[in-house]
């Protein structure tokens, strides 16, 4: 297949022809599952902002097309809350899983439902963290996600990088790492104080964002992906593709690539090592997928 490269690839460019051929053939055969993380993979949105997000009309159009071409097998998965999905993807037709798969919404306007109840512990954690903020100058200004139900996100990129540039300096990164350690330490102390054994602390620091997440132990996108299959919400197909940009996506990308012989597509310098191809920016991945859909089913991309 003569692939037209009009995008930037960080690694794996030699695999592109084979990857494109498998994706295109899977779409033609309607025997493919193609899922993706959102933030940092398909879009760059302001961390912690979920109401006034940039409209994802391009991503909506592409993923609706992939969903039609794959016979409904094109889910998006994000750590962000359901409100982010509602505001960003107006007119979506595809399944979307929020809070790492704890919330699942099939169509626009449907409320997410949680299949693990961690709401009470999360509420207690938020209250204790707000109290810790008042007594710890270093923590003042850390944003506590108020749209989530089953998980909590503590965001502080804006404290280090007020302009929210896509790339930050190494000095900023050092300060980001130091603050991350402090937030993690405080979070662990709070979980111990409230006696919650069902929650864990996870940090994610990338060149564009830094967050600390409080989420149920055992929850990851791979298990959420498997849950969707076990419930026959997603079918087992000949080819599975998953796209991601950070270690929060590693579990599902590794499962797809190593266990299923599928395709893992990464974005950015922090993309998991299991990625077959790593694109430089979300725009590069979008161009590649738009090209693949155009080859397989151009009528779906136009709709």
Image: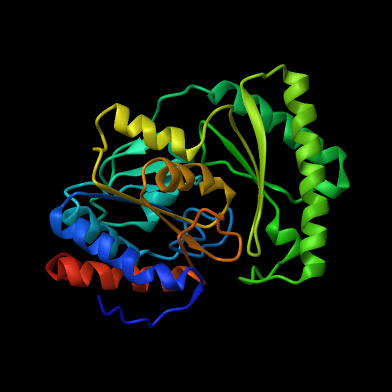
Q: Residue at x 69, y 58 (%)?
A: 157
- Image vertical order of residue 139 relative to residue 286, above or below: above
Residue 62 sits in quarter? bottom left
| x and y percentages locating residue 25 in the rendered image | 20, 60
Q: Residue at x 30, y 33 (%)?
A: 229
- Image vertical order of residue 188 relative to residue 144, above or below: above
> Could you tell whether 264 is left or right of 91 in the image?
right
**286 or 150, nearer to the observer:** 286
| x and y percentages locating residue 38 in the rendered image | 44, 55
> Could you tell whether 207 is left or right of 12 in the image?
right
Considering the image in quadrants, where does the N terminus appear? bottom left
Colour option used: rainbow
| x and y percentages locating residue 47 in the rendered image | 58, 57
Residue 268 sits in quarter? bottom right
Q: Is residue 83 visible?
A: yes
Q: Is residue 303 visible?
A: no
> How many numbered discs, if any?
0
Determine the residue located farthest toward the top in the rendered image: 195
Considering the image in quadrants, where does the C terminus appear? bottom left
């Amino acid at each position: 297949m003569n692939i037209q490269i009009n995008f930037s690839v960080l690694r794996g460019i030699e695999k592109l022809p084979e990857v494109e051929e498998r994706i295109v053939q899977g779409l033609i055969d309607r025997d493919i599952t193609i899922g993706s993380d959102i933030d940092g993979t398909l879009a760059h949105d302001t961390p912690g902002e979920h109401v006034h997000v940039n409209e994802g009309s391009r991503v909506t159009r592409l993923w609706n097309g992939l969903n039609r071409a794959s016979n409904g097998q094109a889910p998006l998965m994000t750590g962000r809350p359901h409100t982010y999905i509602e505001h960003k993807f107006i007119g979506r037709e595809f399944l979307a899983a929020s809070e790492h798969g704890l919330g699942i919404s099939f169509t626009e306007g449907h409320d997410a439902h949680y299949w693990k109840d961690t709401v009470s512990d999360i509420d207690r954690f938020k209250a204790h963290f707000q109290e810790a903020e008042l007594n710890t100058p270093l923590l003042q200004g850390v944003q506590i996600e108020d749209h989530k139900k089953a998980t909590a996100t503590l965001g502080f990129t804006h404290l280090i990088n007020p302009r929210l540039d896509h790339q930050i300096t190494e000095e900023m990164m050092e300060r980001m790492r130091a603050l991350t350690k402090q937030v993690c330490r405080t979070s662990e102390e709070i979980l111990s104080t409230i006696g919650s054994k069902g929650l864990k602390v996870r940090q994610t620091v990338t060149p564009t964002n830094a967050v600390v997440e409080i989420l149920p132990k055992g929850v990851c996108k791979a298990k959420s992906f498997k849950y969707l299959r076990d419930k026959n919400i997603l079918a087992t197909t000949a080819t599975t593709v998953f796209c991601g940009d950070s270690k929060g996506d590693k579990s599902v990308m590794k499962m797809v690539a190593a266990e299923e012989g599928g395709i893992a597509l990464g974005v950015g310098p922090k993309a998991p090592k299991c990625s077959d191809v790593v694109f430089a920016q979300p725009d590069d991945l979008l161009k590649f997928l738009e090209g693949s859909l155009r080859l397989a089913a151009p009528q779906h991309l136009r709709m």
